[in-house]
Image (tube, helix red, strand yellow):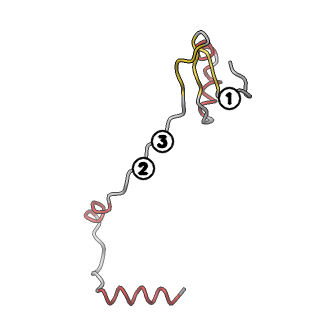
Amino acid sequence: MSTATQDPRTASVRDLRNRFADVSKWIEDGEEVTITRNGAPFATLAPARPAKPRKPDWAGWFKKHPPLGRKLSKEETQAFYDDMRGEL
């Protein structure tokens, strides 16, 4: 099996069979491991990538959860923002 100073990590098929716990620890630590057979690399084991977060569907959310109260007029909205800016 490769040493800790070697980069990137490599392991033979025999290492996988006999010392999989050690190899899996490398993968858990975020390292990619190159698998060799008869001294030649043939595969790479890498940590799983988390799924990309989906873009929120705000239109659908507001359809299910309509805002409470009434809509503010343009003047009321402007007065609200002017009041908020004055407090800073």
Q: Is residue 57 above or below residue 19?
A: below
* Mark 3 nearby-residue class (10 Å; few <14, some 14–19, many ≥20): few
**Residue marked by disc 3:** 50
Q: Position of residue 29 (x, y in %)?
A: 63, 35
Q: Number of marks in the image?
A: 3
| Amino acid type shown at disc 1 | Asp
Residue furthest to the front in view is 40
Mark 2 touches mark 1? (CB < 8 Å): no
User: How far is mark 1 from mark 3, CA to CA?
Assistant: 24 Å
The front one of 36 and 52 is 36
Quadrant of res 13 = top right
Q: Secondary structure at mark 3?
A: loop
Residue placed at 62% from the left, 23% from the top?
Answer: 21
Lower sequence index among marks 1 and 3: 1
**Residue marked by disc 1:** 7
Residue placed at 68% from the left, 29% from the top?
Answer: 7
Quadrant of res 76 = bottom left
Please give the label number shown on residue 32. Answer: none
The front one of 63 and 50 is 50
User: How far is mark 2 from mark 1, CA to CA?
Assistant: 31 Å
Q: Secondary structure at mark 1?
A: loop
Point out the image quarter for the C terminus. Answer: bottom right
* Mark 2 nearby-residue class (10 Å; few <14, some 14–19, many ≥20): few
Q: Secondary structure at mark 2?
A: loop
Lower sequence index among marks 2 and 1: 1
Q: Position of residue 51 (x, y in %)?
A: 44, 43
**Residue marked by disc 2:** 53
Question: Is label 1 or label 3 in front?
Answer: 1
Left or right? Give the position of 41 relative to 69: right
